[in-house]
Image: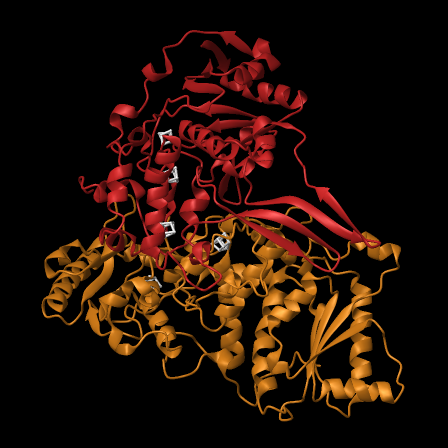
Amino acid sequence: MKIWTLQKKRVGDWMAALRAAGKEVLAPCEADGLLRFRPIDDPSAIAVRPGPCPFPFKEWLFPPHQVLFSYQFEGGKVNLREEEVLVNDQVGLFLRPCDAAAIKILDTVFLSDPPDGFYQLRRSHLTIVTLGCRQAVPSCFCPAVGLSPTSLEGSDLFLWEEDDRFLVYGVSEKGDRLVQVSPDLFEPGEGPEPDQLPSPLPFMERKEPLTNVGQKLQGLFESDLWQEVGRTCLGCGICAYLCPTCHCFDIVDESDAYSGIRCRNWDCCAFPLFTLHASGHNPRPDQPSRYRQRVLHKFAYFLQTFQQNMCVGCGRCSLFCPVGMDIYQIVLQLTGRCLV
Amino acid sequence: MAAVRTDSERTEKGWEPKLIAFVCNWCTYAGADAAGTRRMLYSPCVRIIRFPCTGRIDPHFIVRAFEQGADGVLVSGCHPGDCHYVSGNLLARRRFAIFKALMDFLGLEPERLSFSWVSATEAGKWVEVVNSRVEALRKLGPARVPWGTLSGPPPSLNGRSVAPMPQEPLSQVKPDDYQAVESQLRQLAEGLLATGQVKAVLGYGKGSLQQATPIVITNATEANQLIFNEHCVQNLTVYLTSPSFRSLRPLGVVVKACDSKSLVGLLQEDQVKREDFRAIAVSCPGVKVNGRWADKCLSCDQRIGPIADHIVGSSEPKSTAGADPRDWEIQTIEKWAPAERWNFWMNQFSRCIRCYACRAVCPLCYCQPCIADKNRPQWIPTSPHLKGNVSWNLFRALHLAGRCIGCDECTRVCPVGIRLDLINRRLSLEVAKRFGYEPGKDPSVPPPLATYRPNDPGEFIL
Ligand code: SF4
Ligand code: SF4
Ligand code: SF4
Ligand code: SF4
Ligand code: SF4
């Protein structure tokens, strides 16, 4: 693995060079009190806080609302138009290791044969620059799902803060190419293997493994425990919408007399409508059964199909749940381990 | 976004205002018909859609018309007292007053949305009303269709820094004020469960990440898990209508003074039966959101709400009540020109991701299914684009007008920080002013938009 160093004060120059090379830089910044990845020019607008950015990067690969195609009736003809928007390469800057790992999970879903063209297009234009975590926040549980504050999963470049500079690890060729955009900003450097970096891992409290609980959870399918743990779930969509790996969508046609679109919008298994049949029957009739789906999808079904969990331990769902449903504690409780 | 016609197309063809008129069959339609038979000339820019009664004209139709490219909407029906269904127009008058107040607050130019009473004999008045509306629209130019795109940066409430934020009175609140309540609450819950007066108690417990989270206890020995402190923000009455709580009736539910008001709403609307729950009213000094006293608490003058089966702690009214900082914010917004207001709100709504968390936490959003989930027809576009978001936010607000008890849960949970509280509060003020009604007081009176008075103000009606 190649290692460089980059002076912090030169990040702005690097961003300018990336932009000059036709790339759009997306980094967490705050507007109207809302932290979100946005296209930025000015490095001083970047707002990196400990822990993951509340809004995950997902929205740039899999937007909340995406038009697939549109049509118009004109002079007795139907004009179909494909909606392809992306022209620029994009650089995702300062994702957390969990976020980068989440993109790998999205890849598994959207790029497995046959690949999803819309996702593929955006993904092929994206390079991911991750910032390792010098500090974790109490909701973080990446170690519980086999990751860590310094894991490289899904990253193209991996950054580690050291005083007034970053150690820059080249993880993939795509990443190296970003360095080559302005090679004079990067000095060849030395550093320990990423897993030897002084990460907060030893001090993190939430690391009871959740990686091998699939069978046990599935065995509980009929258990009354779900009523107990899922009863207070309100069925709002916050957990799924802020989760970097959740990927369910709804295909919708919207039209009027002259024109129309087909689009896909985010959807969420906590909604009653998600499973409502045309007959009126709903196989998941209440919130506990919907919450069970969420947990099993993340820790059992996905594991069965793709040999990995569908949770990267970012803790967003648990932190932002309006009623404090903490998926880490709940899985521990379900699998009969310690409480609080 | 599926636009009906773009503005440029319309300009090429020479723009003419498009006024959609929703009229009742018995009076205004007959009046318009009379104008026709008398060969009276008036603007052809009006498109008439006939309804049995103004009472049938849901604000949805009006929203739909704007969405589809109308430049203005006119709603017209029988004069008060003339309704062929006795009171359809009187109920409609209340609904339209609130809808108009909402649209004004959001920044729709007032001339784009008009109401009139036109009887079957008033052909002349019909001609006059249509012509004057069309002229007003011609002056305004094309509507910002559909619902306008974003134009420039929105005005800002300045991070509220200039708002008078009287946090001081509440600084007298001490941890002891909660602790006494907490220990009494545990004793009470223990007793209620031990004697079988309730099957379960729904209260607050310590969360693994959050300082307080809803918990359900079914055993008297678990009563010491209950907590009460400044972090107990959630309004637990939202669970009373949840199917997962049905088996726990009668349920003891811990309520703060504000939460207790939503019990009034649920009883008023027949969503819970009085015998299904016992309100355990905790004497509440106030709660904090993100480290600051919640806005609602700054003006709260009660410790115990209207519905209380068991009172825990003092029920003395509070001396700490001051002004609500939202009133200042609302006044600020109202000083802006319509275009600025519109810009502000479109910017807010554009962020909505349609998670419906605002609906999920609201104790009075209990409809199964919600209008937003109905797809035959699809009244509210499900897509999180501006058009869908505006529709959703309008209808959330309208459906709660006169019903919202101001627990501010929707605003607390909105992951993109939309100021739903300002809209709710603005409509509450309107309801109070017009109908002298305050929600969450008396379960025996009907909600204000489900009733009318013959002399309700109708000053906005032509
Ligand atoms: S979960 Fe792990 S990788 Fe993600 S922000 Fe927390 S410490 Fe960093
Ligand atoms: S777990 Fe929490 S965030 Fe997720 S749907 Fe339920 S209440 Fe909402
Ligand atoms: S389930 Fe929760 S903790 Fe896991 S990846 Fe999703 S938001 Fe993060
Ligand atoms: S509004 Fe009043 S009763 Fe409600 S939380 Fe605030 S202080 Fe307590
Ligand atoms: S909570 Fe906020 S983002 Fe979610 S639907 Fe409501 S207004 Fe939209």
Residue at the image position 88 percent from the left and 54 percent from the top = B12
Chain B color in figure: orange
In the picture provided, is B54 more to the left or to the right than B450?
right
Residue A147 is drawn in which quadrant? top left
Residue B66 is drawn in which quadrant? bottom right
Chain A color in figure: red
Q: Nearer the viewer, residue A317 or B292?
A: A317
Whether B348 is drawn above or below B68: the answer is above
Residue at the image position 38 percent from the left and 43 percent from the top = A317
Residue B429: x and y in percent read 50, 71
Q: Report ligand 3 position as a quadrant.
A: top left
Q: Nearer the viewer, residue B451 or B243?
A: B243
Whether B162 is drawn above or below A101: the answer is below
Q: Nearer the viewer, residue A312 or A272?
A: A272
The C terminus of chain B sits in image quarter: bottom right
Q: Nearer the viewer, residue B175 or A318?
A: A318
Residue A86: x and y in percent read 65, 33
Say whether residue A329 is visible: no
Residue B71 is drawn in which quadrant? bottom right
Residue A285: x and y in percent read 36, 59
Whether B28 is drawn above or below A92: the answer is below
